Amino acid sequence: MKKYYSQNYDLALKPKKEEFSDINSLDKLYDLFSKAWSEQTCAPRLRNLWNKNNITVGQCSITSLIIQDIYGGEVYGVPLEDGGFHCFNFIDGIIFDLTSSQFGDVKLNYTLKYKQNKDEQLLNEDKKARYILLKNQVLEVLFER
């Protein structure tokens, strides 16, 4: 599977907490999440599209929120043609999107127009449950090393 992250593929990440200090590159971050994403963490409306060849589909909002927990920064979203919304991270002046590979070669128009609020996002009970599940799976993968 082709990986897409940002316009800056060499981005060095600086976690906010010492426990995450070894997750200092996008490749390490992607590898960690790729072991944690699952059909259960996928947005319900997209579960029929989720498979082992498209593991990032339906994972954007909860992934972006967890990345924000680890590195800080902001989460933004862009509207999609199908009426959905796609979330990505903006950290230290750099836009990056760990789940963009779900769109194949389609290039999204990343703007900083639609800032996402974590507390508002997690008012949705399903999204909150998927966020907790994915975060626990990420931590499990991280600390099983």
Image (tube, rainbow, N blue to C red):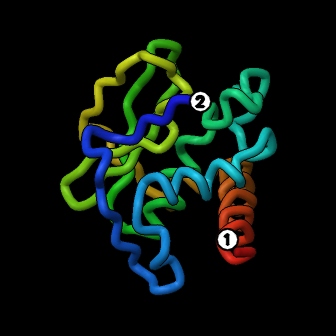
Name the kind of residue labelled 1 in the image.
Leu
Q: How far apart are marks 2 and 1 (CA)?
A: 23 Å
Instruction: Tell whether 36 sits left or right of 22.
Output: right
Name the kind of residue labelled 2 in the image.
Met
- Quick one: which residue is furthest to the left in this view? 93
Residue at image position (70%, 52%) is 35
- Quick one: which residue is furthest to the top in this view? 81
Residue where numbered disc 1 is placed: 139
Q: Nearer the viewer, residue 58 or 104?
A: 104
Please tell me whether mark 1 sits on a helix, a strand or a loop: helix
Discs 2/1, front: 2
Residue 6 percent across, percent down from the top left: 33, 40
Vertical position of residue 87 compared to residue 33: above or below: above
Quarter holding residue 111: top left
Q: Which of 127 and 41 is in front in this view?
A: 41
Q: Which of 21 and 61 is in front in this view?
A: 21
Residue at image position (74%, 75%) is 144
Residue at image position (44%, 20%) is 80
Please tell me whether mark 2 sits on a helix, a strand or a loop: loop
Mark 1 is surrounded, within 10 Å at the Cα level, by few (under 14), some (14 to 19) or many (20 or more) other residues, namely some
Q: What number is the disc on residue 1? A: 2
Residue 54 percent across, percent down from the top left: 66, 28
Residue at image position (19%, 54%) is 93
Q: Which of marks 2 and 1 is nearer the N terminus?
A: 2
Residue 134 percent across, percent down from the top left: 69, 57
Q: Quadrant of the N terminus?
A: top right
Quarter holding residue 112: top left
